[in-house]
Image (tube, helix red, strand yellow):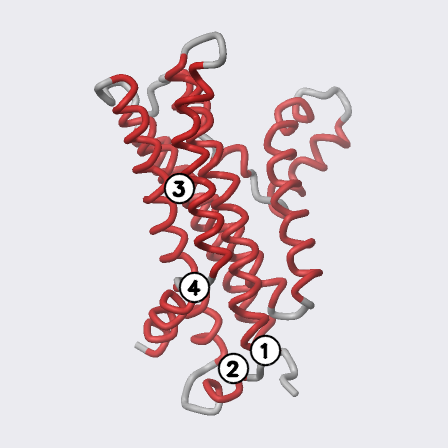
């Protein structure tokens, strides 16, 4: 109950962030503007709108997860308001998990808004979501798991580092996760056995964020099986859970003075 209370308060606190509204409004404007962009380009306009819509949701969702995740924890520590909370019968684990869960709710709400904006633009353009609705929903469900990982790393680094370094570390991990997912297949096919060993290590250390990216399925109308969505989402949430648990462990050992 204490964790849920902190999560609820964190959600309300995040809704007061100007940065959150600026990013969401900009993302929605870009998604709606994709309709105009598609009219100025050659090719399938539906694919262009779908690609810009899902791409905007991913980029701005990541920025919200990273910057808001770091701010929600760092601000509590810098202003020492966390001391008043921890002085009560609230464990440090409950404090971190509450912050993280509140952030996840914020991300889910904003991702839903951006998904609805993309759907509305596609519906206006095509008159129907037939053939795209399932892939669009699957892409955003898997994208939520991706953002959960980004938020978990943001909370982890914010627990023991300065806000600036926490943002740099988190964005570096996110970038490495995307790049690793793209080159993983090439490394596995390399004749060098050392590359295969490196892949096995990176499979544990780095999140495979490319695995949690279904933008191509939406753009090209590819079918996505529910089983694949479930497995990918489970992987993402499982990885995020491990990172969040590590954040709780780090915060428990942190010397608050």
Of badges 2 and 3, the one in the foreground is 2
Q: For mark 3, what is the residue? A: 233
Sequence-first disc among 3 and 4: 4
- Give residue 177's quadrant in the image: top right
Residues at badges 1 and 2 in contact (C-beta under 8 Å)?
yes
Residue lying at the far top of the rendered structure: 42
Above or below, 98 against 134 in this view is below
Callout 3: SS: helix
- Label 4 vs label 2, nearer the camera: 4
Give left or right: position of 154 versus 117. right
Mark 3 and mark 4: span between their CA atoms? 24 Å
Q: Which residue is mark 4?
A: 14
Q: Residue at x 48, y 71 (%)?
A: 96
Name the residue that disc number 1 marks: 77
71 above or below 213? Answer: below
Q: Residues within 10 Å of mark 1 (few under 14, many from 20)?
A: some
Q: Nearer the viewer, residue 104 or 34?
A: 34
Marks 4/1: CA distance?
Answer: 16 Å
For the C terminus, the image quarter is bottom right
Which mark is first along the chain, 1 or 3? Answer: 1
Q: Residue at x 60, y 69 (%)?
A: 159
Q: Which residue is mark 2?
A: 82
Residue 155 appears at what percent x and percent y? 55, 63
Crowding near the residue tagged with mark 4, few <14, some 14–19, many ≥20 C-alpha atoms within 10 Å: many
The percent position of residue 137, horizontal first and vertical second, equals: 31, 33
Sequence-first tag of 4 and 1: 4
Mark 4 vs mark 1, foreground winner is: 4
Q: In the depicted view, which residue is nearer to us: 43 or 97?
A: 43
């Amino acid at each position: 109950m204490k964790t849920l209370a902190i999560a609820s308060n964190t959600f309300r606190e995040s809704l007061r962030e100007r940065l959150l509204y600026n990013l969401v409004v900009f993302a929605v404007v870009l998604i709606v503007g994709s309709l105009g962009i598609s009219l100025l380009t050659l090719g399938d306009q539906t694919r262009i709108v779908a690609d810009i819509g899902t791409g905007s949701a991913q980029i701005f969702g990541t920025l919200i997860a990273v910057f808001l995740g770091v701010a929600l924890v760092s601000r509590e520590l810098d202003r020492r308001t966390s001391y008043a909370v921890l002085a009560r019968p609230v464990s440090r684990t409950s404090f971190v998990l509450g912050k993280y869960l509140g952030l996840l709710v914020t991300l889910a709400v904003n991702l839903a808004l951006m998904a609805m904006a993309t759907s509305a633009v596609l519906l206006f353009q095509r008159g129907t979501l037939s053939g795209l609705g399932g892939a669009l929903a699957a892409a955003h469900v898997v994208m939520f798991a991706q953002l959960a990982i980004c938020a978990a790393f943001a909370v982890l680094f914010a627990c023991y580092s300065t806000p600036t370094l926490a943002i740099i570390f988190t964005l570096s991990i996110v970038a490495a996760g995307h790049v690793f997912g793209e080159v993983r297949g090439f490394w596995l096919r390399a004749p060098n056995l050392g590359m295969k060993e490196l892949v096995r290590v990176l499979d544990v250390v780095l999140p495979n964020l490319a695995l949690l990216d279904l933008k191509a399925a939406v753009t090209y109308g590819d079918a996505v099986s529910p089983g694949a969505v479930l497995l990918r989402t489970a992987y993402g949430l499982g990885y995020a859970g491990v990172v969040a648990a590590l954040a709780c462990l780090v915060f428990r050992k942190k010397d608050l003075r």
